Image: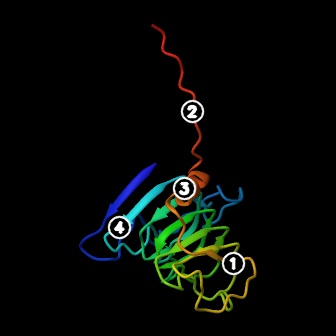
Amino acid sequence: RHATLLCRRHNDCSFAASLLQVPYITTIRTGSPSIIPAYREIAHNFIIANYASQEAIDTDDGSAYYYTHDNFFAYAANGLKSDFGGHHNHHQHNVYAWVTNCWGRGNGNAFLANTCISNTEKGGFATDCHLPALMVVNETKIYNKHALISVDVCEPTNRVVGGWPKVEDLVKMAESVLDFRPRRLPQLKR
């Protein structure tokens, strides 16, 4: 799947914007009645969020229980965004290309095994030293112009890998999360 976001009227827009949902009772998550839903999945998408978009997936304003994985997001200000009451939003094995910030804080959030290519000189990664309750940030590969980080990094699995990658390497990153592989087309009968 591919989407291009054209956001020209203001910068608070994204391809998928989720807002606080009205609670409902469901048995999907555990088999027992609960207002806590099962995780909703956003996977295998190629999303271009240009014209100063805040992020490709906007999970703030009470958004919760999203599992966003194996996506390629290009050109947004932020990777994971989950402020104003957003919580339990998990981003795993995504590539964030040419973003300003890899992730933002939120209770119960997870930012796991992602690749972040920051459009900054030596930033893009907020300190992971004092995270909100239940938030986990680890195994992040960070790229920026000078291959340096200007904040303290406390989790040893979060590391600067290098400067901005070459185009060929960026394509390989996209292939790895989007599951590109040659497909054999069926033979047409004539």
The local secondary structure at tag 4 comes to strand
First along the sequence among labels 2 and 4:
4
Q: Are marks 2 and 1 in contact (CB under 8 Å)?
A: no
Which kind of residue does numbered mark 1 sit on? Asn
- 64 with respect to 1 (left or right): right
Q: Is residue 128 above or below residue 99?
A: below
Quote the CA–CA distance across marks 3 and 2.
Answer: 17 Å
Q: Looking at the picture, how far across and down is residue 44, in whole percent?
A: 54, 52
First along the sequence among labels 1 and 3:
1
Residue positioned 68% across, 90% down in the render: 129
Q: Quadrant of residue 29?
A: bottom right
- For the residues carrying marks 3 and 4, which lies nearer the camera in this image? 3
Front residue (pair 17, 19): 17
Front residue (pair 113, 181): 181
For the residue carrying disc 4, how many other residues have a C-alpha within 10 Å: few (<14), some (14-19), or many (20+)? many
Which kind of residue does numbered mark 4 sit on? Asn
Residue bearing mark 1: 158
Q: Quadrant of residue 151?
A: bottom right
Residue bearing mark 4: 50
Quote the CA–CA distance across marks 4 and 1.
Answer: 27 Å
Q: Is residue 1 above or below residue 21?
A: above
Residue bearing mark 3: 174
The local secondary structure at tag 1 comes to loop
Q: Is residue 59 visible?
A: no
- 33 with respect to 125 (left or right): right
First along the sequence among labels 4 and 1:
4
Residue 183 numbered mark, or none: 2
Which kind of residue does numbered mark 3 sit on? Ala
Q: Looking at the picture, how far across and down is residue 27, in whole percent?
A: 65, 57
Front residue (pair 175, 79): 175
Quote the CA–CA distance across marks 2 and 1.
Answer: 35 Å
